[in-house]
Image: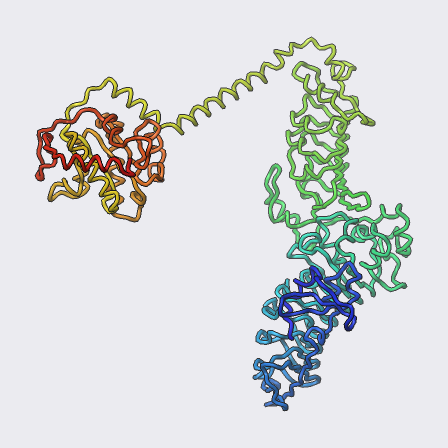
Amino acid sequence: MMINLCYLLLFLGSILTFNTAKENSFKANLRSDMEYLCPIKCQETNHGKCCCACMISQSELYSNITNRPLFVEQLDVTGFSSTLHDPYEYDVSKTNFEFVYQDGFLRRYPLNMCIYNIVTIDLTDNKFEEVGNVSCLMDLDTLILSYNLITFISNRTFVGLEKLRKVDLSYNRLKYLDNNLFASNTVFFADFSGNYFKELDVSNFLHDVSCNFNFENNNGHMTITNHENIQLGSEITEFCGHLNFANNSLSINPILLVNDNINPNEIVKYTAGGSLSLSGSMYVCDCKLAELIQLKYPDFIRLTSKELHESRCQSPESLKNKDIYEVWENKSLHDEMICDLTIPDGCKSFQTRDTMNEGCSIDPYIFKCNFLCPTQSDGCECRCTSQPSKQRLIVDCSNQNCTDLPRVIPKSKYKVTLIMSNNNITSVNCKYYYENIGVLDLRGNFVKYLSDDIGRMTAATEVRLEDHTLKTLPKSIQNLQPNVFHFGLKGIPCICDHIWIGEWQKYRPLNSQNFDKLYCSSNNITIEKYLDKAECDIESIDHELKTWISFSIIITSIVGVLTLVYYFRFEILLLRQRLKFSKKQFAPKEIDFYISYDGENDDVRKFVYNLDRFLRIHEYSTYITCRDAEIGETRENNILIHITKCKYVIIVQSSNMYTKNRIYSAFCRQEYRLAWNRFMQGNLNNILLLDFDNEGPGQYFHRKTVALYRFGMGLSVSNRKISLYDKILEIFSKTARSKQVLRNGWMKTNVKVSSEDLSTVVNFNSKNYM
């Protein structure tokens, strides 16, 4: 059975079952209808997924199905037109084919290639200038186009070929590859030897599973890049393949471009099964190699493999011709494996640094240049040295007449030793790299001012300020250990405002060594001893602090009160109106109740008609829009005219009553706003909200509705604990007793109610609307 390679990686993570009784192999179930064979020896390794992917043969992968050959019929002498021919006429839907045509003149694939289920293509030594379109060959396993004329490959070339495992493009004319060339494939074997690469990105060969990628015998210097910022431990969890860069001139060992997020001694954790051949070049024993030489010798050799005669350092001069094993074994020689960091290609220091911002920030373009050692154009020329053996970057700007710390320093994963001794620095201002400072040497400078950002030097182990002229210290210095600072014999004024400095000096680690105590500038005692003798009124010292604390409490209280006022603003407005109503005498109104409701809801409409009958039985006059609207007036005018004549408003709220995309809802929203505004203006005696669907305040005028419910101006129709109609009679006072009679006579106050009507209302009051 043919196995789909897209399931290969699912198997690589775990091997479920195995069987050693047949053909020295074991089986792992990928799906209920397919199996994948993996060599038995892969059980005995810690790199099972690589072993299984790399050791499986094509015949095992395709369940020993034989690939049938196809023959080429060339239609013209140019090599652009040809067809494939199957002399045995196998069933193309059930047969695997191989297309082998070497030492020919083909420039294009045969016209009918896509009708065959081709597993292998071998077109060695033809005339192809590009890989071409092979996307129709969904079962393609091996593609060989060596010794052709191909110059470029796009990362779209192999998209969709999920079963592709082997690609051979050796000895072409390739100078460049798109990044992530095999991002959508499971290509485990790739041969790009004998090409002309000038630049190569690690995304094209460093993967979790890369059995063998060959780039040997490249014609020219090859710059290795990492444009995608691929890193060990994140994108690469385990590199276990073999990379062959023999007989090449590389800009850097590829492993060193992907270890920014880990310590050098952790490299082997992610590369335990991988190997790298760099034969054909001498060792450059600088800071880059120093990161790998800290590994165990077998691991070091595995990741920097060279021939025996190449195992001597070529540079620097102090290590030249020393055997690499001697350098690895002699730890003292590791300190000499350094790099003098200069401005790299692509970073124009003089022109671009003029665009940098002041203070802690840095120009984004400059920040992309990882190695920027300060130059004279910055007002301070420095020498920058990376020393991995000490895990530090040394930036030496001593004796340069600098007036400030450098604005930029090289980017490094190591802590910075910044030497600024014997300059003209009087102010230590904010800089973006303070968190990376390990040592700051400011001896020979008359520093008068330390920025409050000095508190960000949390990684610092030593700050030397022996020649300072400081009058005070920034409060943020309390975030740092006092034993980090060396103030020498020069002190600061011992005054009551500096009591906190003495307290800070006391709380240093007990095992502090070579701790320079801070002295008083007026006498030869430490500021700690001054604390014992000082006659300072602690209360007066703390007065300013207490004042600020009190001020903060007041401000916080005011903000809290204002927040509460804002949150309960509608409740406050209702309370104010209630207090006014208790003293105010309302003029008689023409209408007792204005009832607002969703007229398109049949259940609500039935409820309103029963409510209206109940109110009329108790001699209340009512206004219902669909019944009492004045003929000839618009709906808006009818609402405005009659709501001003009413004494009370009852709003029966229901689902979708205020939905914005309904025309009818606009009238309901208008009624709500008018009722609220008139009540706030004192022109309406009361409002009552009836929740018909038991949905609570809802979304429309949510805060106002919540406030009305809190003041007892809202009821739930479905509440069985109360009698809705008894509650209405309790809430509302006497009728308006209007003499006005509308066209339909419903507004007349002296309504004659029959016993039948009364019985209907009583029965209604006993239903679920209570």
Report x, y in % for residue 58.
71, 75
Q: Residue at x 83, y 51 (%)?
A: 295
Report x, y in % for residue 342.
73, 49
Q: How many marks?
A: 0
Let me know if residue 152 appears in the view: no
Report x, y in % for residue 411.
70, 46
Placement of 574 over or under 108, stated as above or below: above
Q: Nearer the viewer, residue 239 or 533?
A: 239
Residue 78 as seen in the image, left or right of residue 424:
left
Let me know if residue 358 appears in the view: yes
Residue 728 as seen in the image, left or right of residue 539:
left
Which quadrant of the rendered structure holds the N terminus?
bottom right
Q: Residue at x 68, y 61 (%)?
A: 201
Placement of 294 over or under 34, stated as above or below: above
Q: Residue at x 62, y 88 (%)?
A: 86
Which quadrant of the rendered structure holds the C terminus?
top left
Q: What colour scheme does the image use?
A: rainbow
Q: Nearer the viewer, residue 202 or 617?
A: 617
Q: Nearer the viewer, residue 61 or 138?
A: 61
Q: Quadrant of residue 101?
A: bottom right
Q: Quadrant of residue 45?
A: bottom right
